[in-house]
Amino acid sequence: MFRVIIVEDEYIVRFGIRSMIDWEKLGLIVMGEASNGQEALELMSKEMPDILITDIKMPLMDGIALISEVRKINPHMKILILSNIEDFGYAKEAIRNGVSEYLIKSDMMPRDFEQALLKVKEAIEITSPTGAIHEEPAVEPLWKEKLLQELVEGAQRDISSLQNNFRNSGSAPFYLLHMGKDATNVGFAEEQSALRKVLDSVLQARELAYEVFPDRQGEMNVLLLIGMPHRQGQKAAREAAEACLTQLDASYGLCFTIGISGEFQELTELHTAYEQARAAVKFKMFVGSGKVIAYGTDYVPGMNPAGEPIKISTNHIHSMVYAFQTKELQSYLEELFEQLDARKDYDIVQIISLELLIMLTTLWSDVSSDQMSIMQLKKQYFDELSKLETLGQSKTWFMGAYQELLQHMIQIYNSDRNSIIKATQYIQQYYQQEISLQSISNLVHLSKNYFANLFKKEMGESFLEYLTRIRIEKAKSLLTGELKTADIGHLVGIADPKYFSKVFKKNVGVSPSEYRTRAKR
């Protein structure tokens, strides 16, 4: 098997590179991966690969510098570059240093990548008669990582080698620790490096058997073999997790929330343990971040039985916003978040938050004609919400966001009142024409929903009620003359005689003919 090292600063891209190829089928094995040139050189100092796959632009040491250093150590190593199309200028310099293949990430298909690797492999075999074939160790670290990733996703795999590996270190029970990332400005690669160092330091000092592996989202997990009875095992797992949190904060200023699964005896139960640990991390929404949360102890599923469904009244919120009822709206949101805190259901919080956000952005769209600004505001809102860790933070954010909207509406209210006056003048002059809510709101350059709500606030009746009243008043005046009822309806903008009679009677209390008779008396 020819050995490969992957060097790429983004974990997701590294994962994609590893996942798109059946390495064993090609006679290759990924012996390691690094997030920059310096890490790659450290790996090579322990064991030299046959093939180097590297990105060009990376922190600390980029691909060009790495290739230059590699050529000093091993002039014959095969190098394959994966990079972005805009970096092709850099590739020219890399090619001068003897790069075997250059592929564009955005255009690369698995088949293209496979062909490039086969080409490089053939070149090695031609230059080295023995093929420099290496034997795969019994339990390869990256193979274990991939196997654990598949197990937490519920896949059925042969785990005998992994199980035997753990049996050499002691007996069950196992625990799974899920490292939930809290808001941070640290880069992904730097964060992952710090996390692995701390985990190794803490767990080795406690002489615990463990395996560290990322899940598909790039969040780190620790499979921990405690080998102690129930209560002692739980205590040992919690103490180890708390020590990790303390060292992460002290050494790197990093904040994590660690979820601990319930104990389990077999690695076939890893998927269930993973879901438990993740559920425990999500519970930080109610107890705060930067803590150790144990499933079954700190977080118990269904700890607050489901009561009445928590619902949001869209019409009620719209009414309070358009009526500028700041205190009433704040009280409504306070009560809503109190219900969410009492229920302590992560999924319900997510659903309610999404509904509140959609209402908020819709209301902003109603009161602003600058769609570019609205798009930027939506992006800002989503970015800010994604960084919130707890229910208390979400409550503060939403109350502030709705308060900001109300303040904006109050500021523009006086200028928009003039638009309502303009609209009423237009209706009084052109009532006999077809006038829709959309056409009149376009006339005064306000959104339809905002115009409708503002009109009712200012006039005390809806746009349609006002238009109908004006038309009926004009019809009453015309009914004192000799015109036919059908003609009068047409003249006031209601062409259908039956509908005119129905609307007239609803508003006046009598039919047009009865009104005419009374008027003549």
Image: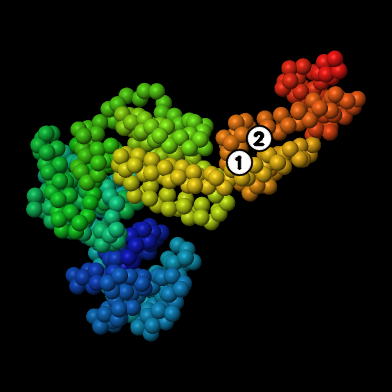
Indicate whether 150 appears above or below 40: above
Q: Are marks 1 and 2 in contact (CB under 8 Å)?
A: yes
What number is the disc on residue 451? 1
The residue lying at 29 percent from left, 58 percent from top is: 185
Percent across and percent down for residue 446 are: 61, 46
The residue lying at 63 percent from left, 45 percent from top is: 419
Say which of 152 and 232 sits in front. Answer: 232
Which of the two discs, 1 and 2, labels the residue nearer the N terminus? 1
- Determine which quarter of the picture holds residue 188: bottom left
Residue linked to disc 2: 463
Q: Amino acid at mark 2?
A: Phe
Q: Is residue 450 visible?
A: yes
Say which of 418 and 357 sits in front. Answer: 418
- Determine which quarter of the picture holds residue 521: top right
Q: Is residue 126 left or right of residue 42?
A: right
Q: Is residue 63 left or right of residue 39?
A: right
State which quarter of the image contains the N terminus: bottom left
